Image (cartoon, helix red, strand yellow):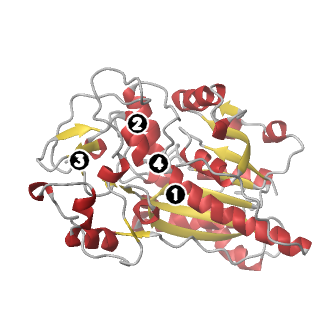
Amino acid sequence: MSITGIELFAGGGGLLLGSAMAGVEHLAAAEWDKWACETLRKNRDADYPLVRGLNVIEGDVRGVDWEHQVGCSSVDLVTGGPPCQPFSLGGVAQSADDPRDMFPAATAVIAKLQPKAFVLENVKGLTRARFSEYFEFVKLRLQHPELRAKPQESWIEHFARLQREHTSITTGLRYNLVTTVVDAADYGVPQRRHRVFLVGFRSDVDAGWSFPAPTHSAAALRQQQLSGEYWQRYSIAKKDQQLIRLGARGDVSKLPWVTVREALLDLPEPGTKKSEQWLDHRLQPGAKTYPGHTGSPIDEPAKALKAGVHGVPGGENMIRFPDGSVRYFSIREAARIQTFPDRYQLHGAWSETMRQLGNAVPVKLAHTVVSSVIEHLEQDRCINLGGNLFDNYRELERL
């Protein structure tokens, strides 16, 4: 079974790469930022397997003629991360009053293409109490994408109408929606990155999907550090052994959280000159600590990489060593923290590439989520056709 997809707000490609690894055949990827589009195009033109032949649409998704882009093809899956600045803890949060809020645009594309499923990702800030009413509105809009706002109707008026009508709607385009807040570290990503996923299945698709269970835990990492197993594995001197600061949260039977040290283990220290062996692995000078921005301890998952409010990545994008010294992650190291493949090259100046990475969905997390969605779609297809489960999975590229 071939799964066709459209990627919205593709950025540098985190969600897109994870989806492609899961088996999605992308018909198009839309993105407005020229440097992110350059990253997608350059990797496509270099014949990178996961974006081979990718149709990159540079521009506002609201202006795309989707009928022209997809032609006669049906779209099984729409994925995307609507710009998160309207809800970000790191930005100036304005939610529905922010022109960068792209949830209405994403909903319009879903209404147009009517995919079997969609996967949208956003910052945890979307679930903050101050945005709770708007978050409920977003969820209702995604469940009933064809129930559009009337002329001159505010989002609050539209929300009230949705609340009145949604329980009685039994016809038209409808989606069963699952929303979940996750920490990427719980899924093997070497980064504490809290994000909300909104996953919808069209009402004619067999219901019952649930978000994949966590595979890693802080408790398992702390146990290995307390027992000495972790330090022995990496030959860490006693004076440099700093326990993870969190308590024993989670299930010790799971895999341990992946630390910065483990993620970067086979990478040499970045130098001031271009590396001949590693893409984008060069030292960026100027790293400094200041209150609240002290870098990521090497023996923990990294703090969430951020795009930077003023275009310059901050203290979250630094590595902190046991002696207290810090330096910026190289672009390749930051890509490792976001679980991007090593042969995938980011394009643009340092600040531009770090912005692409800071805005991205970790590839490994995207792969986990989309693989689960595809499995559910395949099971539904087999149930409807009375056949056997499809198990001829595409060989995955190593993350």
**How many other residues sit within 10 Å of disc 2, few (<14), some (14-19) or many (≥20)?**
many
Pick whichever of labels 4 and 3 is earlier in the sequence.
Answer: 3
Pick whichever of labels 3 and 1 is earlier in the sequence.
Answer: 3
Give the Cα separation between the discs numbered 1 and 2.
18 Å
Give the Cα separation between the discs numbered 2 and 4.
10 Å
- Residue 144, quarter of picture: bottom right
Left or right position of 101 against 2: left
Q: Position of residue 170 (x, y in %)?
A: 81, 76
Give the amino acid type for the residue marked by disc 2 in the picture: Arg
Query: Which residue has dot 2 on it?
Result: 332
Q: Nearer the viewer, residue 249 or 266?
A: 266
Above or below, 195 against 13 in this view is below
- Any mark on residue 295, and which? 3
Pick whichever of labels 2 and 4 is earlier in the sequence.
Answer: 2
Marks 4 & 3, CB-CB < 8 Å contact: no
- Any mark on residue 365, and which? 1
Marks 4 & 1, CB-CB < 8 Å contact: yes
**How many other residues sit within 10 Å of disc 3, few (<14), some (14-19) or many (≥20)?**
many
- Residue 332, quarter of picture: top left
Give the amino acid type for the residue marked by disc 1 in the picture: Leu
Give the amino acid type for the residue marked by disc 3 in the picture: Gly
- Please identify the quadrant where the N terminus is shown: bottom right
Give the Cα separation between the discs numbered 4 and 3.
19 Å
- The residue shown at (69%, 78%) is 208
- Any mark on residue 339, and which? 4
Instruction: Name the secondary structure under disc 2.
Output: helix
Circle nearer the viewer, 3 or 2: 2
- The residue shown at (59%, 63%) is 198
Instruction: Name the secondary structure under disc 4.
Output: loop
Circle nearer the viewer, 1 or 2: 2
Q: Position of residue 383 (x, y in %)?
A: 84, 75
